[in-house]
Image (spheres, coloured by chain):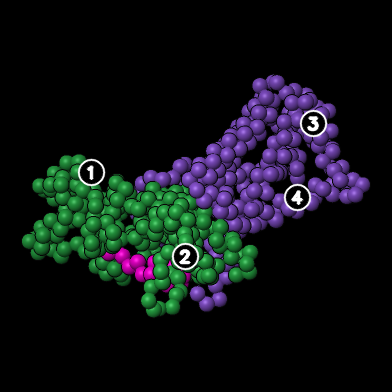
Chain colours: A purple, B green
Amino acid sequence: MKGARASRTTIALKLGMAISGFIFLAFVLAHMYGNLKAFGGHDAFNEYAEHLRELGEPMLPHEGALWILRVGLIASLVVHVYCAVTLWRRAARARTTKYVMKKDTGANRASLTMRWGGLTILIFLVWHLLNFTVGKVNPQGGATNDPFNLLVDTFDVWWLTLIYIVAMLALGAHLHHGIWSAAQTLGWTGTAAKRNRAKVVAFVIALIITVGFSLVPLAVLAGIITK
Amino acid sequence: MNLTLKIWRQQDASTPGAMHTYQLADVSPDMSFLEMLDVLNEQLNAEGEEPIAFDSDCREGICGMCGLMINGDAHGPEVTTTCQLHMRSFSDGETITIEPWRSDAFPVIKDLVVDRSAFDRIIQQGGFISVNTGSAPEAHSVPVPKDDADRAFNVATCIGCGACVAACPNGSASLFMGAKITHLGLLPQGQPERDERVVNMVAQHDHEGFGGCTNIGECTAACPKEIPLDVISQLNKDLRTAIKHGH
C-alpha cells in the first residue's frame, strides 16, 4: 500500500496497549506489596507511606519520585484508554450485522469481558483515588491524614470492602487475559509451548494480585488488622 | 432425518435480508451438509420458490469457498469445512440455523454468499515473493531446515475461507494474515520483502475494515486447517521488527 506506516496500524495500537499494560502491572505489584505492610501494624504501614514521599531525597524534591510515577501512570492510562477505545470502535464497525446465533468456541470468560472489565476498573480507579488520595474521605468521620487509620476505618465498613473485592476480581480477570495477550502482542509466544507458559504465568500473576489485594480489606473486616 | 432449517435470505447486497424457516424431510445422515442444501433447493424449485444461493466449488475441503455459519459455529460443529461436514453430526428433529459470514469487509452478495475479495487484496499487498521468471532454479540450491520447512508447510495450508474472520468477535483477519506472514517469513525466499510485506498487508487489512485482534482464540478454534494462534504472535513480532527498521 502506498504510504503505509507500521506505526499507524491496529497492531501498533495493540503494542501501545501491551506496553502501557505492563507498566500498570509493575505498578499494581508494587502497590500490593505496600498494602501488605498493613499486616505489620500502624507504624510500619505509615512509615512506608511516608517513605514513598521521601524516596530519592535529597536528589529529588519532597514527593518527587511519587510525581514521576504519577506522570508515568497518567501517560500510560491515556495510551491504554485511547488504544482500547479506538480498537473497540473498529471492532464495532467491523461487524454491524450481528449473528442470530453465535457460539463462543475458543474463548474464555476473561477474554470476552476485557472491555467491560476495563471500564469497571476505570470507574473503580476514580472511586479509589477519591477515597484514599485526592478526597481522603473517612466514612467513619475519623482522622484522614493518618493512612493506616483511614484504611482501617474504610474497610471496617462491609460494603466498602465488598466494592474493593469486586474490583479486584475484575482486575484479576482483566490480567488473566491481559498479561498473556500482551505477551502475544509483543511476539513472545511463537510456539504452542511458549503460549501455554504465558497463559499459566498470566493466571498465576492474576491470582497473586487478586488475593494479595483482597487480604488487607478482608483482614480488617475480620478484625485481624485493627487500630 | 427430519430437519427445521432457519436460513438467511437476502435478495442482493442492497436489500435487507431476513431469516426464513424451511422443513426438510428424509435427510440421510450420510449426506454432506451441502448435499442437504442441494436437496432443499430441489424442493424449493419444485415448489416454484427461488433456490438458496450458497458458495461451493471443490467439495473436498481444499478450496475455501463453502463457508457457512452453522448453529453459531463457523463451518459447523466439526473442525472441517462446510462441504466436509456430514449430516450425521446433527440429530433427527434438530433446528439448524444457517447464516452467511458476518463481516462488513465481506459484504453479502445474495443469501449465504459473501464477497471475500478483501482477502485477495490483502494477499496482493505482499502475500507472495518476487522472483524473475524463467526456468525454475534447482530446489536443493537453497537449503531450508526441516523444522522450518514443516512449519511453513503447515501454516501454508490456509485456504482463505474466512472462518477466522467470521468467528472473531472483533471481525479481525489476523489469523489469515499471520498464516501467510509466518509461511513466507520461515523461508529464505521470503526474507528480502519481509518488512514491506507485513506493513502493507496489515495496512490493507485495516483499510478493508477488519477489526484488531484481542487474542481471544475464536479464530483458531474455527479454522478448518487448524492454523495455530502462534502465527498471530509471529505477525505481531514481524510488525514490531518493521517499526524497529523504520517502516
Q: What residue is pinned by disc 3?
A: A45
Identify residue type, mark 3.
Answer: Phe
Q: Amino acid at mark 2?
A: Val
Say which element carries label 4.
helix
Comparing labels 2 and 1, the label whose residue is closer to the camera = 2
Circles 2 and 3 in contact, beta carbons < 8 Å: no
Which kind of residue does numbered mark 1 sit on? Answer: Ser
State how far apart marks 2 and 1 are (Cα): 46 Å
Q: Which of B121/B12 is in front?
A: B121
- Position of A158 with respect to B45 (left or right) is right
The stretch of residues the image draws in magenta is B113-127
Label 2: which residue? B142
**What is the C-alpha distance between the residues marked 2 and 3?**
65 Å
Between the residue at mark 4 and the residue at mark 2, the CA separation in whole angstroms equals 54 Å
Q: Nearer the viewer, residue B154 or B239?
A: B154
Say which of B215 and B94 sits in front: B215
N-term-proximal mark, 3 vs 4 = 3
For the residues beneath circles 2 and 3, the answer to whether they share a chain is no
